[in-house]
Amino acid sequence: MTHNEALEKIKKYCAYQERCQTEVRTKLLEFKLTVENIENIICCLIEENFINEERFSRSFVRGKFRQKKWGRIKIRQSLQYKNISEYCIRKGFEEIDEEEYLKTLESILKKKEGLLNEENEFIRQQKLAKYAISRGFENNLVWNHLTT
């Protein structure tokens, strides 16, 4: 594949959905391009604003929180896995309203509580906490909510 063909194809890939550099680099590697070509294409995409890590981070945080009901810990880990900078991660977290975050935690706990058939209150609380923590919510927030 030529440089220009790859550039046009990857522009369409980026225009379809927000992408980070890691995703784009992985896709370009599938095209069997040289490392130099890949870096040149990524520079072009950044200059033309097809790739913007802060915009990606904001979009990613909004989507994972509102659609998948993930907590901050799980979102942070996913962004770090995609090599997003700490600055962009912080900017992304500005998309989460603290009140909405707590309401989401409460909502997933209520929903899970309705599905549990556990009689023992201690075990019930353990299962609820484990569930919320596995969704990426902070330990202290989960336990504060469960003990009040």
Image (cartoon, grey):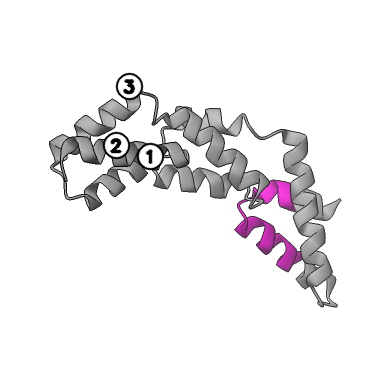
Q: Please name the residue that numbered disc 2 is placed on.
A: 8
The chief SS type of the magenta part is helix
Mark 2 element type: helix
Question: Residue 114 occupies which quadrant of the picture?
Answer: bottom right
The amino acid marked with disc number 3 is Glu
For image coordinates 54% across by 27% down, the residue present is 91
- Label 1 crowd (10 A; few <14 / some 14-19 / many >=20): few
Q: Is residue 103 magenta?
A: no
Image location (x, y in percent) of residue 21: 34, 37
Marker disc for residue 12: 1
In terms of secondary structure, where does tag 3 sit?
helix
Magenta segment: 125-142
Q: Secondary structure at mark 1?
A: helix
Between the C-alphas of marks 1 and 2, the distance is: 7 Å
Q: Earlier in the sequence, mark 3 or mark 2?
A: 2
The residue under label 3 is 47
